[in-house]
Amino acid sequence: MSPRAAKSFPSPYDTKTPKGAEGWQGLYPYNLIFQENLRKQEEQKFWFCDSQHWPNVFKPFEVIGVEYASRCLGAYNTRHYIIPPANGIDFRIHLGYNYFSPVAVAPELIGDRVPHFMERAGHYFQNWAELLENWKKDVLKNIAEIDAINFEKLPEMVSLEDVKGGKGQDPSVQLFDDYDRLISLAYKNWERHFEFLNLGYVAYLDFFGFCKEAFPGIPDLAIAKMVMGVDSVLFRPDDELKGLAEKAVKLDLTAHFVAGKSAAQILDALKADSKGAEWIKAWEAAQDPWFNYTSGNGFYGTDEYWCDNLDLPMGYTVDYVARAAKGERLHRPKDELLVERDRIVSEYADALEGEAKETFNGKLGLARAVYPYVEDHNFYIEHWTMGVFWRKVRQLGQLLADEGFWGNATDILYLSRDEVRPVLFDYANGWAVGTPAIGPSYWPQEIARRTKIIAALETQRPAPAFNEPPAEINEPFTVMLWGITTEQVQQWLGADDSGKGGLKGMAASGGVVEGIARVITSPDQLGELKQGEILVAPVTNPSWGPVFGKISATVTDIGGMMSHAAIVCREYGLPAVTGTGKASTTIKTGMKLRVDGNQGTVEILK
């Protein structure tokens, strides 16, 4: 390893483009790629790959997710709440993957931001329940408006009713308006996404900082356990399936739930059973809204949602029915978690007295009150909002495919959202003039070219980071959410790269387990998991909940104490080591592992 590599990651400007991906930069907005004339400034920043949220190469339209998320997060930090130590997170797309660079606040400016933050955030903390209820109403209203959008083929003639009524507009106006509204409504819900999220992190980090000062040497995991045992709507879809499984056993319907059969086949069999109607009624009642759920993470246009593919939830239900029939406990061990939580809180609280104890209890109470939102927002935004959004995008893609612009509904994803508007005008213009649109003679070959570029980018794993890291990484969001620590970065650089059977990460969820590894790099592989195996993945999604009752531990490449993998594993009582950097590429399926979620270590035993 060269001297430079020992202390620094490569520059993004020096990385090689995979063969066949030449010209990839043209697929993404100019402001999201590293510009040559800005090399000096860009190389002074430390960038890390956020494979936790965006593990796959972006198709051009899919960039909308990271653009909305990063801009809105930054605005709430920097302009809305004026969070003292943190501005936004700069981002770039390089070789198809997303890279982040947190923007810190200059130390001399932090003090001036504090009173603004205290007044603004204080208002939210004092009125949390009322404001959150208002948040939910607005988010659901926006979802309903997105769902009401319907992209239809332009008619042969403007309706006689519109002509006689003097409307003065043809249906192309509605087509343009609906597309613009689709983009705008998604943006509005991403604004709402961060209205409470950063405050949830802030409250927890405030409690975390107090504990670190009051109890020198306290493990991060002990602090995290003090707020576990939450009721999050993100767990509700999985809980619905568990309830349906238990109902199937109670109604003596287990014989109909056969592995390998489709949802349609199982439902047909149930219809023929005298008790089946009761179960089917419960199944249909669970779908709205809880089947607005994806096995992905909602950031990609091809993510499959339960409501669009009933084989997904039915497959999980079949597995739950088999386990329930054996008398296995399906639900999270919430009672045990609460006992453990209260035991830990009591031990530390008893070490304090007077004002310090009151402060501890106050900060803990606030952290617990706001903590559920850290997961809840995922269901309403990433799952529900984005599920409806992508369905409408594909509907528009199918309309244009039917008009010959391209071959399939998902081909629209190879255009940026700003390229779609001219396509709509091209379509409307050909309809208006009575001549063929130009798009069908242009887009098929252009989409084929872009498809090859995306496929070439997908052949190469993203670099974990770029440029020289800071001597100490202590920005709280970076550490808590992504698990990017000074120690972890040094491991990426090879400071501890013996490769002799051990990996170090974050002690994200307690417990020690030995078992067989199952490496999962895509939601499509979840069906391969066997009972008691250890899940090893670049990152897990909150929607993988149905498999957490099957596995014995989790190991991920990226993620901190507040990552979804860490939170979900604590709620399921499973050991977890997150932020290992390279577990999914070092460990192979079938290896025997020892996962120590208390120490944050993974040992390859065999």
Image: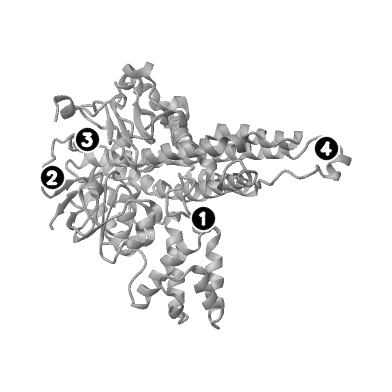
Q: Which residue is mark 4?
A: 167
**Disc 2 residue type (three-letter):** Gly
Q: CA distance from mark 3 to mark 2?
A: 16 Å
Along the line of sight, the residue nearer the viewer: 565 or 168: 168
Foreground mark, 2 or 1? 2
Q: Which residue is mark 2?
A: 499
Residue 504 lies in quadrant: top left
Q: CA distance from mark 2 to mark 4?
A: 72 Å
Q: Is residue 551 above or below residue 224?
A: below
Q: Which residue is mark 1?
A: 292
Q: Earlier in the sequence, mark 3 or mark 2?
A: 3
Q: CA distance from mark 3 to mark 1?
A: 37 Å
Q: Earlier in the sequence, mark 3 or mark 1?
A: 1
**Disc 1 residue type (three-letter):** Asn
Q: CA distance from mark 3 to mark 4?
A: 63 Å
Q: Is residue 10 above or below residue 346?
A: above
Along the line of sight, the residue nearer the viewer: 436 or 11: 436
Q: Residue 291: x percent and y percent? A: 51, 59
**Disc 3 residue type (three-letter):** Val
Q: CA distance from mark 2 to mark 1?
A: 42 Å
Q: Residue 338: x percent and y percent? A: 31, 59
Q: Earlier in the sequence, mark 2 or mark 4?
A: 4
Residue 486 seen in render: yes
Assess disc 1: are there few (<14), some (14-19) or many (≥20) residues with their C-alpha within 10 Å of its C-alpha. many
Q: Earlier in the sequence, mark 4 or mark 1?
A: 4
Q: Earlier in the sequence, mark 2 or mark 1?
A: 1
Q: Is residue 204 above or below residue 40?
A: below
Assess disc 4: are there few (<14), some (14-19) or many (≥20) residues with their C-alpha within 10 Å of its C-alpha. few
**Disc 4 residue type (three-letter):** Lys
Q: Which residue is mark 3?
A: 489
Q: Residue 376: x percent and y percent? A: 44, 50
